[in-house]
Amino acid sequence: MSEGRVLSRKSDEGVSIAAVTGAAMPLNGPQTAAVPGSEIYGQQGQAEKARLGPGVRGRSVALSMLPWGAGMLFLALWQLRVFHWIFSLESYQLPVPSAIAASIQENANMLFRYAMYSGTEMLGGFLLGSLLGALAAAGASFFPTSGRAAVTVLSALNAVPIVALAPIMNNWFGDGIWSRIAVVTVITMAAMAVSLFKGLTSIQPQYSDLLSGLAASRMQFFWKLRLPHALPSLFAGLKINMSTSIIGAIVGEFFIASQGLGYLLSDQIRLANMPLAWSCIVIAAALGIVLYEAVVLAEKRLIPWNRARTDH
């Protein structure tokens, strides 16, 4: 075969390959493999991301707004007396939201003063009970076998009804604010002890073996391994306690008390002033939600790694 025919054949092959792949292919020198349509695929991928981006963001916004929409629908059905029709209730039994809002506006000063009083009882018992429960769990973690039995006995305090505990605390501490703080302390101490003790003792064996191999002391074992590992359990106990502390404070005020949201609630129910009674319920719920969200915010700031893991 002549040299001219060989070059002509190579030229034809190069043109045909270039026509198939859509890329220029040199006849001489080292040849590089080209990914078919790689530039086109890259541009299509970017265009697809740009096209799906607003849709993904839109769905995220819609999901975040769903609870608000459900709440607004609930209030609208309540205001339109749909629940009154379903459960055969009268307006004096279940005031509509507009009547409750008007009552809150008319009694704003008194409600604010009583909310601060109940909030003091709630926060005081929450902090004291959480601290005592954390100390009990920390001490029990140094002796896991006997400590588990002690925490089990301590958890029995959760079985005591608040309505039975409140009169006893009133008898011990009088009718002042300390009796309600004592009630909240008792019901929050056990929950914190159980939750934190579980976090302190549920350590994976390889981590324990590593620190044991490094001849770590008990205190080093606690500060370097147990406590960081138990931080999620600590905040879980705090969130449980924040939810239950408002219950303890309000129920404790049903007994001997002269102020507070629980006292005002029971007094207005006896007087059949239901809009003001429901105002106390709304204010207590709002107070509990705000303080609970404060604990959640502290958890996000102090242990963001745990929040990122649980969000998936």
Image (spheres, rainbow, N blue to C red):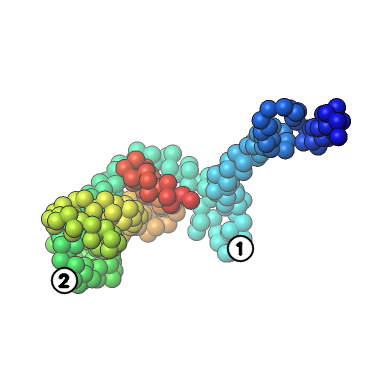
Cα distance between the residues tagged 2 and 1: 54 Å
Residue at the location (44% across, 39% down)? 105
Name the quadrant containing residue 219. Answer: bottom left
Which x, y percent locates residue 80? 62, 51
Residue at the location (42% across, 46% down)? 308
- Left or right of residue 22, residue 150 in this image: left
Name the quadrant containing residue 56. Answer: top right
Residue placed under numbered mark 2 in the picture: 146
- Near-viewer residue (141 or 2): 2
For residue 276, say whether it is visible.
no
Which x, y percent locates residue 158? 27, 67
* Label at residue 86: 1
For residue 243, say whether it is visible.
yes
- Near-viewer residue (137 or 31): 31
Residue at the location (66% across, 30% down)? 30
C-beta proximity under 8 Å, tags 2 and 1: no
- Near-viewer residue (183 or 81): 183
Residue at the location (28% across, 54% down)? 229
Q: Earlier in the sequence, mark 2 or mark 1?
A: 1
At label 2, counting other C-alpha atoms closer than 10 Å, the crowd grade (few under 14, some 14-19, many 20 or more) is few
* SS assignment at label 2: helix
| In the depicted structure, whether residue 7 falls above or below residue 225 | above
Amino acid, disc 1: Ile
- Left or right of residue 141, residue 295 in this image: right
| In the depicted structure, whether residue 60 falls above or below residue 231 | above
In which quadrant is the N terminus drawn? top right
* SS assignment at label 1: helix
